[in-house]
Amino acid sequence: MAGAYRRQWVVVGGVSDYGDASFTGLPSLENAVNDACRIYRVSTRQYGFTGRLLARPEDVDAADQMLFPGQPPLRREVAGSGTARDILGAFNWVRVRGQAQREDLFVFFFSGHGSKENLGYLPACDQSVASHAVGRSGHGQDLPDRANLLAR
């Protein structure tokens, strides 16, 4: 796969804890960060992607202890906790700092809740169900636009 693309980029987000469900309307998820850590490890270690891992550091530590004992911890590779700003910042990091080009492969993996009301919308860890259900947070609508910018 490495020969087919100039560079390979991955942004992996995992949100297990959405905070107070009475405010967010989103219950916690048991394995979201575990899945994100697995994808991040495989893509960066086995396939040579340059990446950003977005998850709460304490959740990444727990995933490391349970899934990858004896392996180097991922904590030092955490680039944010999975907020909307973190996700958009990681996209910008790929585009601007990484100087992504059309010949590059870009993969975005998100493990967490989605939205039935606003298809394709991914609520970050700092958003409530009310903000994403009506699409007024401003962040979710930016994700497809940001992904399109990577292709330019």
Image (tube, rainbow, N blue to C red):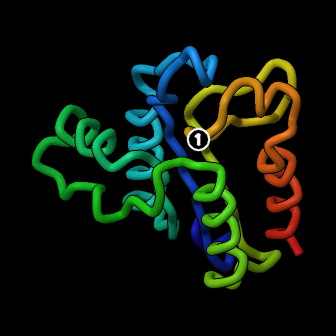
Image coords of residue 64 (percent x, y) = 24, 42
- Quadrant the N terminus occupies: bottom right
Q: Tell whether 22 sits left or right of 72.
A: right
Q: Tell whether 34 sits left or right of 131.
A: left
Q: Is residue 86 above or below residue 123?
A: below
Q: Residues within 10 Å of mark 1 (few under 14, many from 20)?
A: some
Residue pictured at 62% horizontal, 26% vertical: 113
Q: How many marks?
A: 1
Residue 51 or residue 143, whichever sits in front: 143
Q: Tag 1, which secondary structure?
A: loop
- Quadrant the C terminus occupies: bottom right
Image coords of residue 66 (percent x, y) = 20, 32
Residue pictured at 58% horizontal, 58% vertical: 86
Q: Is residue 134 above or below residue 45?
A: above
Q: Indicate the quadrant where residue 102 lies.
A: bottom right
Residue 6 or residue 140, whichever sits in front: 140
Q: Residue furthest front?
A: 23
Q: Indicate the quadrant where residue 91 lies.
A: bottom right
Q: Is residue 146 above or below residue 19?
A: below
Q: Which residue is mark 1?
A: 126
Image coords of residue 54 (percent x, y) = 49, 52
Q: Amino acid at mark 1?
A: Asp
Residue pictured at 38% horizontal, 52% vertical: 41
Q: Indicate the quadrant where residue 60 lies.
A: top left
Residue 49 or residue 27, whichever sits in front: 27
Residue 73 or residue 18, whichever sits in front: 18
Q: Tell whether 9 sits left or right of 33.
A: right
Q: Residue furthest left?
A: 70
Residue pictured at 88% horizontal, 58% vertical: 145
